Amino acid sequence: MNAVTLPLPSIPATSGIASFPRDQWYMAGFGSELSDKPVGRTFLNDKVVMFRTADGQVAALEDRCCHRTLPLSCGTLETTGLRCGYHGMLYAPDGQCLEIPGQDRVPAKARVRSYHLVEKNQLLWIWMPAQEGGAPTREAPDYPWHDHPDYKWGGGHYHYRAPWQLIHDNLMDLSHLGYVHLKTIGGNARLHMNAPMKVTAEGDTVKVVRHMPGSVPPPTYLAAWPFGAACDRWQEIEFHVSHLRIWTGAALPGTASLEDPQRHGFHMRGLHGITPETQETCHYFWSMSSNQHPDMPDTSQEVVDQTRFTFDEDRLVIEAQWENIRAFGPRAEWIDIHVDVGANRARRIVQRLSGQA
Amino acid sequence: MNAVTLPLPSIPATSGIASFPRDQWYMAGFGSELSDKPVGRTFLNDKVVMFRTADGQVAALEDRCCHRTLPLSCGTLETTGLRCGYHGMLYAPDGQCLEIPGQDRVPAKARVRSYHLVEKNQLLWIWMPAQEGGAPTREAPDYPWHDHPDYKWGGGHYHYRAPWQLIHDNLMDLSHLGYVHLKTIGGNARLHMNAPMKVTAEGDTVKVVRHMPGSVPPPTYLAAWPFGAACDRWQEIEFHVSHLRIWTGAALPGTASLEDPQRHGFHMRGLHGITPETQETCHYFWSMSSNQHPDMPDTSQEVVDQTRFTFDEDRLVIEAQWENIRAFGPRAEWIDIHVDVGANRARRIVQRLSGQA
Amino acid sequence: MNAVTLPLPSIPATSGIASFPRDQWYMAGFGSELSDKPVGRTFLNDKVVMFRTADGQVAALEDRCCHRTLPLSCGTLETTGLRCGYHGMLYAPDGQCLEIPGQDRVPAKARVRSYHLVEKNQLLWIWMPAQEGGAPTREAPDYPWHDHPDYKWGGGHYHYRAPWQLIHDNLMDLSHLGYVHLKTIGGNARLHMNAPMKVTAEGDTVKVVRHMPGSVPPPTYLAAWPFGAACDRWQEIEFHVSHLRIWTGAALPGTASLEDPQRHGFHMRGLHGITPETQETCHYFWSMSSNQHPDMPDTSQEVVDQTRFTFDEDRLVIEAQWENIRAFGPRAEWIDIHVDVGANRARRIVQRLSGQA
């Protein structure tokens, strides 16, 4: 019987396969996830274990014991560090092995790589250096809305079987609302598509702004704020290489300048931390913070729940999209349309920061 | 730690990997499958979306939006075409994009490939051209038994994790009945094996005929037709590259010439549309049409149900066979036996039509 | 859209990928598994079907019909051999085809490879020759404890998604008990780690001995034997390339010489037959034989059940370890510690017998 060798599959460049931007703070999770157990996650192809030490600090190491490669995330937390669940080697938060049970001497090379992990605004940020051991060259991002007295928030974590940039594309243009989110926040596809969109870029950020005065308020808005038949809506999307901040909301018609950052009204502030796991998969950490009208019932939990429902719909679309991109391979050229301006600028930033410019 | 690279798996040539016969009408499904939703399927490695237009016609396009490659089979049907479920681009049945929401101009290159799809005798046939855009050079096959007043029919669709030619092999020789279908229509292995088998080839078709006069009628036959202790049975298998027609049945002993195409008796006419999906998987669309004796209860549904049960058994065997072929690879040479004559002729036709002669 | 080709995955050398020791008897299962149906299993990448003939002998063939490669393990047993479940070819226990239904002549080349399989002490052992057709150069191993009047035994079969040598590593050093088996037989990690360990090698075997006089008896020991507050424990591990024999137990304090092979007390004799399936998977056949105190209830079934529970824990660890080794690839160097002496000697024997020395 003759045999034939199948060619290797080729991955479309949309996967951002060539490399990832390094020397960046990426979102690694939520502070609340680290309590009495270590948490293992892969970021930018690096397997990492995160844990909280006895004094409340957070730490991150390579997720392997240097003895026989058991994941340290299968181990247990002790006062001084993380103990491997196979032969009991104990690791300090800096990756040095402190103890090899039954052996007097601990060789200096008995250590694993450590990562800079910080907890800030109830978020975990990990520095993914260009060179192993490289120290952060700037502070992790601020996200004040989690700690702001006017806002309440909730969030979640998706594991995506799709490359991270497909989520950027999705978020950088909300015109898909009317087609993807028919069951929830859609219904006004034309309004979104036809509203003027302002795209500006500065440094490593891109901003996409749509103002839609005189809109019909969707149900969630009506439940949260005393709108009548109309409201002045805004969508302001800010792309940073490791996350997006999407500020949406509405004011009573004609009562606030949509140009004024201090404008009143109903505010929803979404954080979207998108961290590559591998070339073809990623983490999507999100939170939604909203304010409450003093005379209305608190709808913040409802806003979080509806956000989750909406993001579930996005996941179905984006994973189907990637599966199809994989299937068609290089045969499927992309035609750009008007709504792609912001997304394409974001892609150029990612490309430049990945050293592929 | 040293590392070793595993060799690429090699696919035995039995998969028909090298190429597929093109410029052929293949079965794509049943007309009844196309109603209010598009249907996505892969044929000969091409991902295709099929749908029915407002005027009742059927159409087939490449299953991707030319914008960002979402499968069009995730979209929705409208009066003038198929709308993508991501950003709402609308496609005509010929693959041209008719509308890009929010954009005035639709560029001419905003189009996807279309396929010739026809509905005939309640079947869908798709033309898979040798060159993209190639038009059919002949009519799709006729299958009059679906519309014949003497017959009632039912059918189904299997997705096989095995290459299409293994199903040809199976159907071109029914001597496996006595071993695979022990629980249903088997039981007379020797009779099948020893009945004279006549194999003839003409053009791109092969015919295998077994006549078994004086057989004991199996239970289904007894339920459908007033046979006594014996009947004169026939099996006539006709191979066409994209489908097989298997005509089995029986007449009262000595009452009909088994050479006469107009012979009376109990008739079961099986259609077997086998369409490659990929090198290692295929679609198997089948139907079974049977006639009814005027004085007997209608057993056509029972015949369809038993056929399905029997085909389930074949699937187990053929998928186990392919998994084993994959595992042994080129080590497992094939020994031919007497029953392979018809199957091997069919393989030579497939090979020639695939341009591998 | 540009495309990029992903590199082939590389398998760390810990998988023992390069080759396996051949000209060895490997465990293939338990005699009780062969009754009225053939059993298909893969050993050292060879797909094998095992069956019991009408006269009670056991036999093993390549698991494929030489006609169209259906696994013979899908077939049925007859008095003279194994009949294929597709077209009914009948094979003798030596691999020769005896009958092709409907065909007078059976060609000599209609045969499949046979293997030497023996049943001994209720175990099945298969000879995996260096050259196809190579005959055994020695007897299959003896395992008298299965047939010893003082012992009762039970066992099981695991399929591991990990290379066989990771199980050797695990068993050659029981110091992991205190970390992996916290819920069952662990709890005295320090005691194990600090007990003197004697490692000796002779020919193709390695022996690791730990004596722990004055130990606190664990619950199972207390249930099976009238220990008080203390007992003198032993662990004697004997590595052979295809299996390990682990003899653990305890005597009343100071009543038996732990050097005397005939010592009395509570004895647990574990057999661990580890047979490679592929480079990355293996079979793990095990049994546990224990003796009973004349004045105590019979705890042999309890001992087998607890052993199974403990081995379930090992499997979780070892499969997680291999998944991690796969993920890190050659980046993850191994640091040796004191407990690895025995395991590393065993690895050198495997390497030498695999012709990689």
Image: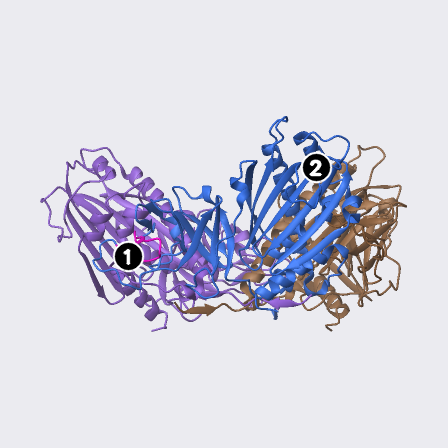
Chain colours: A purple, B blue, C brown
Q: Which mark is residue B270?
A: none
Q: Residues within 10 Å of mark 2 (few under 14, many from 20)?
A: many
Give the residue pinned by disc 2.
Answer: B251
Residue C31 lies, with reference to residue A117, above or below; the image says: above
Of residues B205 and A34, the one nearer the viewer is B205
Three-letter residue code for mark 2: Ala
Q: Which residues are magenta?
A: B87-100
In the visual, does B342 lie left or right of B108? right
Residue at 80% x, 67% y is C130
Return the x and y of residue A64 as percentages of the image width and height. Answer: 54, 60
Q: Amino acid at mark 1?
A: Met
- Numbered disc 1: what chain? A
**Residue B2, percent from left and from top:** 61, 71
| Residues tagged by mark 1 and mark 2 found on one chain of the structure | no
Position of the N terminus of chain C, as image quadrant, is: bottom left
The residues bearing labels 1 and 2 have C-alpha atoms spaced at a distance of 71 Å
Q: Position of residue B191 (x, y in %)?
A: 79, 44
Which residue, given by chain and number where applicable, does mark 1 sit on?
A: A172
Q: Give A295 or B82, whichever is nearer the viewer.
A: B82
- Which quadrant holds residue A97? bottom right
Q: Main secondary structure of the magenta part?
A: loop
Q: Does residue B52 belong to the magenta stretch? A: no
Name the foreground residue: C124 vs C216: C124
